[in-house]
Amino acid sequence: MYRHIFRKTLGFMLIVFGFFTLAAQDLKPIDLKLPKPMFVGTPQNMQVPNLEKPLGKPRPPFLAPVGTVNLAKGKSVSSTDEEPIIGEISYITDDDKEAAEGSFVELGPFTQHVTIDLEKKSNIYAVIIWHYHKQPRVYYDIIVQVSDDPEFKKNVTTIFNNDQDNSSGLGKGKDLNYVETAEGKLIDAKGVQGRYVRCYSNGNTNNDLNHYIEVAVYGKTM
Amino acid sequence: MTKKFTLAYILIVFIALAFRLPGLSFRPMHGDEAVNAIKYSNLLEQGEYHYNPAEYHGPTLYYFTLPVTYLASENTLQELTEVTLRIVPLVFYFMLFAGLLTIKNRVGQVTVLMAALLLALSPAFVFYSRYYIHEMLFVCFSYAVIFAAYRLYQKASVTWSVILGITLALMMATKETWIILFFAALISLSLLIVIYPQFRSEFIVRLKNLSPIMYITGSLSFLLVYVVMFTSFMQDISGFWDSFYSIWNYSSKSVENSVHNHPWYQYIKWLLFNFRSGNFWSEGIIALLAITGVFYGFNSKFSKSVKLLFFMKFMSLFTLIALAIFSVILYKTPWNALSFWFGMIILAGFGYSALMRNIHKLLYKKMISGIVIIAIIDLAWQSYQLNFTYNEDPGNPYTYAQPQKDIFRLLNPLQDIAQKNPDKENIYIQVIVENNDYWPLPWYLRDFSKVGWWSNVNMELPSADIIITSPGMEGDLLHKFYEINPPGKRDLYVPLLSEDVNLRPGVKINALVKLDIYNLIH
C-alpha cells in the first residue's frame, strides 16, 4: 500500500516539476538563419536576333477538333544521335515535361533531329516542343517537318522553320527565335497529314548541344 | 599651356560632365554592379575584404569607394545609392583627362584636344564611365603606367619612378587582364628596339640614366602598394599569394567554354558595326582617325619629331596588339574594349593633328575638319541616345545582360507591402531562382532585413510571406504548398503581378504572396 502511495506521489511530483520547468523556459521564435545571396559572375547576354517577344503571361489554350489527343505519347522515336550522352530518346514521348534530371535527353552538337513515328497517318493540328527550359535558352535552327516518308525525301511539309540563315541546309526560315519556357513551343500544324514528325535543332545559346524534354503531337488518326 | 588651349580643355571637360552627371541612377543596376555593391558593403560595414583569385577582380574598386561614401555620409548598405557608387568610376574617368595633359608637351596641343573631345563623346566611354565596375579604374591606371613610363623615359626622376611603381601596382590590383596589356607593351617595345636601331641606342642611353635610387624607390613603392592592396591592408596575407594563382585562373577562363565566348571580330562589331533595332551605331570616326594616326606614326617623312613618332609607333603597336590579343581570347565582354579603345582615341587625336599639319591647301583642311565635326556631332548624338534613350535596350551594343526597368514593376508593390505590413521591412521574403540568377535583386531588396536566397525550393523550410521566383520553380513550389504541407497548414498564394517581370532579356520573375499579404495592397 505504501509503495503504491509512494509511486503516485512521486508521479505527481514529477508532473508538477515538469510543469514548472516548462513554464520557466522562455518560448521564442526559432531564429531562422537565412542564406545570403550567392555571388555570381556576369550573366549570359541574350542577344539573339529576330527573337519572339514573350507573352508575359500563360499561353491561352489552343482550339482543336473534338477527339484530338497527343498522338506522340508513348510512340517510338529515332534520332541522328542513337547513343545520347545524357538520358534516353524515349524520354521525348514519355509525357514528362519537367526539366529535372532524368527527364531530358542530351544529343550531340550541331544539327541533330528526332523523328516520331505516329504509327498511322494522322491529321495533325498542333506540335508542342519542350527543349531544356530550366535556364533561359534559345535553341537554334528549329525546324519541324511532317511526312509519310520515314526518310523524309518526299511529301515533306515544313510547319515551322526559324533557321534564318539556312545554316542547317533545309531552307531559310521566316519564323522567329524564341526563349524556351516550361510551357513549350506551340506550333500550328494547320491539320497537315502525315505519319512521321521530325524536329531539328542546332545547338543553343549556352552550348552546341541539343536537348529534348518532350514533343507532343496533337491530332486525330485517319 | 596657352590660354586658348586651357579654355578649350575646360570646355571639353564640361561637355564630358554634361553627358555623365545627369541621370546617374536612371539605368537599373547591372548584376555585376550589384555584386560589387554588396561586396563593397562588407568592407564598408565590417572593414572586411578578401581577394578572390577566381572571380570579381581586384580590391581597388572597393577601397577607392570608401572615401566617396565617407564624403556622402553613407555608412551602411541601406544608405548606399547608385549615384554615390557610380561616381567612383566617374572620378577615374576624369583622371584620364589629367593623364592626357602629361603627354601634351610631346604629342602637341591639337592631339590632346582632339583626343579629349573624342574621350568626352565616345558612347562606350560615356556608358561605362557610369558603371560601378572595375573597368574605368583599370583603364586609368593602365594608361597612367604608360604615361608615367614615358615621362620617366623622357627625364629620369625619382618622382616618376615612384609614380610608375604605384600605378603599376594599382593596375595589377584592379583587374587580372593587366597581363594582356603588359605583354602588348612588352612586345611593342621589343619590336621598336629590334626594328629601329636609332630607338635602340636611345633606349639604352635612357636606361642608363636611371639611377639605382630610382630603381629602388620605384620597386619599393610598387611592392608596398601591391602588398597593401592584396592583403587588405595586412589583414589577409593569403591574398598576396592568391594574386599569383589568379593569373592561372583567368588564363583558363579565357579558353574555357563559356556563355561569354564570342567570335574574334566581336569587339569590332560592338564598336563599329552595330545595326540593331533599326539603328546603326558606330564609333567609326575614332577608328578612321586612329588608322590615320597609325599611318602618320610610321611615316617619318610627315614629321620632323623623331621622339613624337616613336611614341606614336609605340601607341600604334600597343593598341593593335592589345586589340589582337583581346580578339583572340574567346571570353569577351564589351567593357573590355576600353583597354585598347583609349589607345585608339589617342591615335585618333594624333591622326587629326597630323592631317592638319600635312595638308597644306586650306580648302582641303576645311573640308576634312567639316567632315570630322559632323562625325563628332553624330558621335555626340549616339552617346545621348545610347546612354539615355536606349540605355537598357538589347539593341544597344553596350548593354550586356542588362536588367530592365520592368524590375520596378515588382519592386514598387513590394515597397507598398512593406509600408502597410505590421513588420514593415522585416517581412520574410524568399528569393528562389535557378542558378542564383536573381541579381541585381540583392541590391534592390537591401532595405528588407529578412530575405533568404536560394537556387532551388527547400521542402523543409517554412514558406515565406513573399516568394520571388522564376517560372521554372512553380512546379516545385506548388508541390510544397499543396502536397508537402499538411492539411490546415496550406496557405493560399497568389501571384503579385498578372504579368511576369522581365528581369533582363530572356529572364522572367514574379512574386507569389500569401493572400492576406496581397490584400494589404488590393
Image (cartoon, coloured by chain):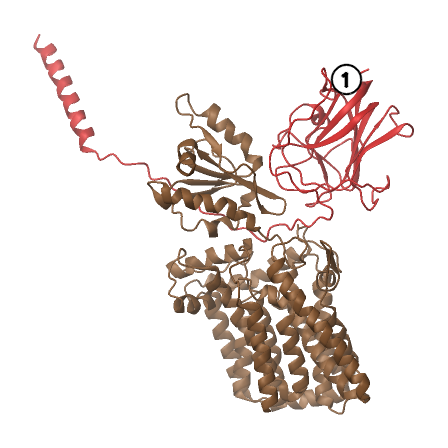
Chain hosting mark 1: A
Which residue is at the front of the view, B520 or A147?
Answer: B520
- Specify the colour of chain A: red
Residue at the extreme right of the image, as rendered:
A154
Can you say whether B495 is above or below B243 in the image? Answer: above
Which residue is at the front of the view, A38 or B296?
Answer: B296
- Quarter holding the C terminus of chain B is top left
Crowding near the residue tagged with mark 1, few <14, some 14–19, many ≥20 C-alpha atoms within 10 Å: many
Q: Position of residue B222 (x, y in %)?
A: 52, 76
Q: Quadrant of residue A100?
A: top right
Can you say whether B253 is above or below B473 in the image? Answer: below
- Which residue in the protein does label 1 denote? A220
Residue at the extreme left of the image, as rendered:
A2
Q: Amino acid at mark 1?
A: Lys
Which residue is at the front of the view, B281 or A86?
Answer: B281
- Specify the colour of chain B: brown
- Quarter holding the N terminus of chain B is bottom right
Q: Residue at x 57, y 36 (%)?
A: B471
Tell me if I can see residue A35 in this picture.
no
Which residue is at the front of the view, A119 or B355?
Answer: B355
Residue at the extreme top of the image, as rendered:
A1
Can you say whether B411 is above or below A89 in the image? Answer: below
Q: Residue at x 35, y 44 (%)?
A: B424
Q: Position of residue B211 (x, y in %)?
A: 56, 89
Q: Residue at x 74, y 28 (%)?
A: A127
Can you say whether A196 is above or below A209 in the image? Answer: above
Residue at the extreme front of the image, as rendered:
B522
